[in-house]
Image (cartoon, rainbow, N blue to C red):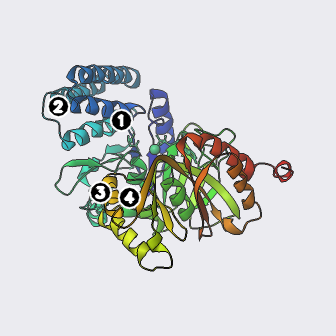
Amino acid sequence: MLVQKFGGTSVGSVENMNHVKEIITDGSRKVVVLSAMSGTTNALVEISDAICSQESSTALELIETLNKKYVHTISELLNENFLIAEAQEYISKVFDSLREITILDYTTFSYNKIVAQGELLSTYLFSSLLRQEGINAMLLPALDFMRIDNNNEPDAFYIKQNLQRILSKNEHIDIFITQGFICLDVQGQISNLQRGGSDYTASIIGAAIEAQEVQIWTDIDGFHNNDPRFVENTTAISQISFDEAAELAYFGAKILHPQTVMPVRDLNIPVRLKNTMLPAAHGTLITHHVTGEGIKAIAAKDGIYAIKIKSARMLQAHGFLKRVFEVFEKYETPIDMVTTSEIAVSLTIDNASHINAIVQELEKIASVEVDDSMSIVCLVGNNIIYHQDTPHLFQILQDVSVRMISYGGSNNNISLLINTTDKKETLNNLQRYVFESHEELLEI
Ligand code: ADP
Ligand code: ASP
Ligand code: MG
């Protein structure tokens, strides 16, 4: 079986939903994972924020605007009267329940319930379209099988058991339509796999059903060698390894949720990235196969804090780093980059929830400085630290101030820490230094 996931833009208009319908009706049996229509989850987050800050009239206005969008979508998407009536009833219920939440006490549960509506709406409407066209498909509620455990990790055993049971009970069905992103938590309450999580849903399902391939259909023709939101002339990469893709996704390549490759990597299930609007384009194939030498792609991750821990006690002493790391361990805060000198260590974190407590503890053993609004720029490729073209990247030191460099941690990754305000310039200059002609640069 195949798993095909379609993102927000891919289901963001009636025209695109019809493209999706063409793509999925190729005759192979599959699970189709849908995101919310583009803009919907952001709108739901805004609604939730307004409710949380007790601005109920703002919340109600936002709900009204979104409601209208769906009324309009139904009128364009469906022409069978009974399907139109059913869909209208469904969306009335959804929007009435949102209006109700505005007068109830706001909790985390409310947030999770509100943001879940996007995927529930898109899958409902898309299934109605397939019914209208007489396609042999079934709506498979994600909350019937998708569950996370106490550590917010997918409960692989539960998911596999439930999915396999449902699929084998419905052997006559060709296409199962399910929601990305949403799941249940251990208490059985509605939860989610974090923003962008529909990609992760697809790979979790891929692993559970041992799919032959997981396809992520989006609005671009595959994994590009740099972030197309900030750099022009980026190009699609035809093949990339699981490790390279995981690293780039972790360090900010928005095309993939950071966890996407984890469930399928060990099972060696390929992940293919494709463009819904341009299905003939090759896209990107992610497997264990490592191709090429040198820098393959660049990504950047924002929201980074740099912490400098300085102490004369570090000089020729042992055990200092252990004490530093223990503080981060205690607050379950992962560290991304580390550089050391004889009397100081600098490191980065992206989760600042315990930063005050961490700094207080570190100040017992050293002086501490924290810089926020930093970005990690990550360069990934096979054996890049030995490649002849790699030195060109260090031209960047002439353009922006680089706070930290991590080189040699692995052969396949180099990371730079910069101010977020320098990100665009950094990505653009690296694009030239790394991927474009080197001759003119050698003359500098
Ligand atoms: P979807 O809604 O289909 O999940 P996303 O917006 O989450 O789509 O991801 C696709 C977007 O990711 C692209 O439109 C592009 O702007 C952005 N992006 C960031 N980095 C990359 C990259 N390295 N390669 C391709 N796209 C990238
Ligand atoms: N709709 C969710 C979001 O916008 C999940 C996804 O699109 O992957 O984050
Ligand atoms: Mg996405």
The amino acid beneath tag 4 is Ile
Mark 3 Cα within 10 Å, few/some/many (few <14, many 20+)? some
Q: Amino acid at mark 3?
A: Ala
Q: Nearer the viewer, mark 4 or mark 2?
A: 2
User: Mark 2 sits on what residue?
Assistant: 101
State the residue position of label 3: 357
Q: Secondary structure at mark 3?
A: helix
Residue furthest left as drawn: 104
> How far from the left and from the top, in percent, is residue 425?
64, 41
Q: Nearer the viewer, residue 399 or 65?
A: 399
In the rendered structure, the answer to whether residue 263 lies left or right of residue 147 reads right
Q: Which residue is mark 1?
A: 41
The residue shown at (20%, 39%) is 110
Residue picked out by circle 4: 204
Q: Helix, strand, or loop for circle 1? A: helix
Residue 53 lies, in percent from the top left, at: 23, 30
Q: Quick check: is the Cβ at mark 1 less than 8 Å away from ligand 2?
A: yes
Disc 4, SS: helix
Q: Quarter for ligand 2?
A: top left
Residue 121, position as x, y percentages in the image? 31, 34
Q: Is residue 249 visible?
A: yes
Tell me the CA gap for discs 1 and 2: 17 Å
Q: Are marks 2 and 3 in contact (CB under 8 Å)?
A: no
Task: Name the residue nearer the viewer: 91 or 355.
Answer: 355
